[in-house]
Amino acid sequence: MRVVIDTNVLISAIFWTGGPKQLLNKVRHGKILFITSQTLLNELKEVLVRKDKPFGLSEEEVDRVVSAVREVAEIVHTSSRVERCKHQNDNRVLECAVDGGAEYIITGDSDLLELKSFRKVKIIAVREFLMEVLNLE
């Protein structure tokens, strides 16, 4: 099963316990194929170093986090141009999903969740994915 995990879910998985961490553990154990793009990895890095965010990581720590994410992901080259959402970062998620042949986008972003699907890619929240797709509680 090929999935795009949105940046907000990845950050939750990295820093906290709960559904996002459970999802990332499924990726680490090879139960789910996590796909991402260089653009989404760049977004992750940008969010982690932003001064208005509570992470407080050094540049070196952020590089280690991004490298760890890269190790468990398949990096896809995106060539599609999508202009479906008002936020450009959301469009980049859709592009990654389409070009990477994803079955699901897993996100906490309300604008993406509102779409429900895009070009046969289901857009779903973490909890819903864990319960309905993986049959986990």
Image (cartoon, rainbow, N blue to C red):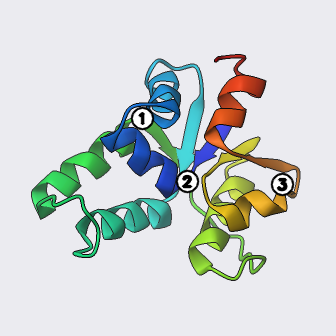
Which of the two discs, 1 and 2, labels the residue nearer the N terminus? 2
Query: Viewed as shown, does residue 9 lie left or right of 96?
Result: left
Q: Are discs 1 and 2 less than 8 Å apart at CB? A: no
* Residues packed near mark 3 inside 10 Å, few (<14), some (14 to 19) or many (20 plus): some
**Residue at figure coordinates x 16%, y 58% from the top left:** 57
Q: CA distance from mark 3 to mark 1?
A: 26 Å
Residue at 41 percent of width and 59 percent of height: 41
How far apart marks 1 and 2 lie (CA) works out to: 14 Å
Amino acid at dot 1: Val
Q: Secondary structure at mark 1?
A: helix
Disc 2: CA contacts within 10 A as few (<14), some (14-19) or many (>=20)? many
Left or right: 48 as drawn, with respect to 86: left
* Number of numbered discs on residues: 3
Report helix, strand or loop for mark 3: loop
In the displayed structure image, the side of residue 106 where residue 132 appears, left or right: right
- Please state which of residues 14 and 118 is positioned toward the viewer in this rendering: 14
Q: Which residue does the numbered mark 2 point to in the structure image?
A: 6
Which residue has dot 3 on it?
A: 116
Vertical order, 93 against 120 (above or below): below
Give the x, y percent position of residue 74. Answer: 51, 42
Which mark is on residue 72?
1
Quadrant of residue 111 within the rendered picture? bottom right
Which of the two labelled residues, at mark 3 and mark 2, occupies the earlier sequence position? 2
Please report the residue visible at 82 percent of the width from the left and 62 percent of the height from the top.
115
Considering only vertical position in the picture, is 59 above or below 18?
below
Type of amino acid under label 3: Lys
Can you give x and y, in whole percent of width and height, for residue 77 in the image? 57, 60
Q: Is residue 111 above or below residue 67?
A: below
Residue at image coords 38%, 45%: 70
Res 94 → quadrant = bottom right
Which tag is nearer the camera, tag 1 or tag 2?
2
The x and y percentages for residue 124 are 73, 45
